[in-house]
Image (tube, grey):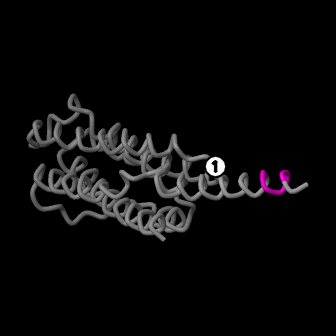
Amino acid sequence: MYTKMKTQMWTYIFVIFFTLQSKSSACEWLGQYRRISKDSLTLLRQMGGNYPDIRVPFPGQLYNSVDNAMVEDRVKFLVLTLEHIIDIMDAREDMHAVQWNLKTVDRFLADLNRQSSELKECVARYHHPSHKESYEKKIKRHFRLLKKILKKNEYSAQAWEQIRRSVKHHLQRMDIIASNATYFLKV
């Protein structure tokens, strides 16, 4: 009886230790996200100078709900959104009307790809499945709308500037989500 209780006690201690360990180490890179994100925003600004004063559709409510989700869901959302941004911004063949420096675009995409790959490693370490599958459809729908804006406006410079402004909003909100998730992991 005593040996059984002792074994159970050590099992509980191990589970608690493992749970705490996995929470703190599940995404150590998330702490560096902010620095890389700041670099991405700087490169985005350098692409076209001042952002035009154009109204751009943005899924603010979606970001609010994700910011209240579990850390795993927040990180998964960041990865998913980064992939959509990379997809829309990696269209050199359609950027003929805009006067962006393509080397800056390449550096910007490299930063985004690094963030995405590092965050994918974080997602792979989480032991709990994601609970917020609905955001995947919503963010996909939003980026489909952005692509329609580009196509409808025949990939004009103004359309690309709308996209650049939208990407700026996404990166800023994603930075807030990452900061909040980092804070939650430290608590």
The vertical placement of 187 against 41, above or below, is below
Task: Reply yes or no: does residue 158 show up in magenta.
Answer: no
Q: Residue at x 71, y 54 (%)?
A: 10
User: Looking at this rendering, what residue extends furthest in the top direction?
Assistant: 93
Task: Name the image quarter holding residue 59.
Answer: bottom left
Q: Quadrant of the N terminus?
A: bottom right
Q: How many marks?
A: 1
**Quick one: 150 or 141, which is closer to the camera?**
141
Magenta residues span 3-7
User: Looking at this rendering, what residue extends furthest in the bottom direction?
Assistant: 187
Q: Residue at x 31, y 63 (%)?
A: 172
**Quick one: 138 or 95, which is closer to the camera?**
138
Circle 1 residue: 128
Task: Name the image quarter holding residue 19.
Answer: bottom right
Give the residue type that dot 1 points to: His
Q: Main secondary structure of the magenta part?
A: helix
Q: Residue at x 44, y 67 (%)?
A: 186
Where does residue 140 sit, x and y in percent of width and height?
A: 49, 45
Where does residue 27 sit, x and y in percent of width and height?
A: 44, 51
Where does residue 74 sit, x and y in percent of width and height?
A: 49, 57
Question: In the image, 99: left or right of 41?
Answer: left
**Quick one: 19 or 84, which is closer to the camera?**
19
Question: In the image, 19: left or right of 93?
Answer: right
User: Looking at this rendering, what residue extends furthest in the right direction?
Assistant: 1
- Disc 1 crowd rating (10 Å Cα; few below 14, some 14-19, many 20+) is few
Question: In the image, 95: left or right of 64?
Answer: left
Give the secondary structure at mark 1.
Answer: loop
Where does residue 129 sit, x and y in percent of width and height?
A: 64, 47
Task: Name the image quarter holding residue 144.
Answer: top left
The vertical placement of 92 against 26, above or below, is above
